[in-house]
Amino acid sequence: MIEILSDEELQKMREAGALVAKILRALKDEVRPGVSTKHLDDVAQRIIKEAGGSAPCVGFGEPPFPAAICTSINEEVVHGIPSDKVILKDGDIVTCDVVAELHGFNGDAARTYYVGNVSEDKKLLVERTKECFFKGLEQAKIGNRIGDISHAVQEHAESFGYGVVRVLTGHGIGRQMHQEPDVPNYGKAGRGPRIVKGMAFCIEPMINAGTEHVLLEDDEWTVVTADGKPAAHYENTVIITDNGPEMTTYEEEI
């Protein structure tokens, strides 16, 4: 069942989203060669604790996820596990996917950051993945359908020959970090649930430089591209208001 939020509840979503944006801003400043992904998780956990929030990813799933954020490097699409043994290297791209709960509501967003000097191909992948998000956002209007978002993301990504991941999707969000409806990054326009005021969901293109196909690593969390080519991820929490879609987790510089 799709949750429809009141104006008061939407305001709480804004507060949770602002916390996620603060974390992403801090992480961007920490991403550089020589830094461990465990350090990035420590930064996120500290900010969440200081704000009086919680990290829903900790202990989530089976096996239980051991960290507050996901840190996915190069060919890792999503759900990379932070570790003090994983050190960022010059030329990497790293996706930080952050979920934070505050006052009973959740925010969720992801950014793929450059580590040092990154190749032009990787930069284009990251920038075009971000463009895919905004193509989808344009369709997140009252009266449209979720499929309009999905189709816009797919069309833009595939125009560059990229692979659009099918087995992972965006999702509803609110009191839980994953709720109905699913928000795929592919599909036909005019399909899926109708978009109405009070909905909240995450649009999150996960775009591969090569094949759309992915594999699951032995840790049972990390998803990688099947051909070893890099992937990028861009996500924001979106709430639907009378004035159109609003990103609760977005700041221009992140």
Image: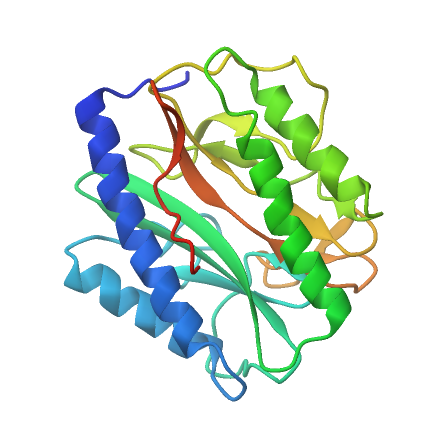
At x 71% / y 58%, what residue is drawn? 125
**Number of marks in the image?**
0
> How was the colour assigned to the protein in this rendering?
rainbow
At x 55% / y 50%, what residue is drawn? 234
Question: In this view of the protein, which residue sits in the foreground, 9 or 54?
Answer: 9
Looking at the image, which residue sits at the far bottom? 34
- Residue 78 x/y as whole percent: 59, 55
Q: Is residue 213 left or right of residue 107?
A: right
Residue 229 can be seen in this image: yes
Residue 75 can be seen in this image: no
Q: Is residue 214 left or right of residue 136?
A: right
Quadrant for residue 4, please give it: top left
Q: Quadrant of the C terminus?
A: bottom left
- Residue 15 x/y as whole percent: 22, 43
Q: Is residue 156 left or right of residue 232?
A: right
Q: Quadrant of the N terminus?
A: top left
Q: Compared with residue 162, is residue 231 higher up or lower down, i.e. above or below?
A: below
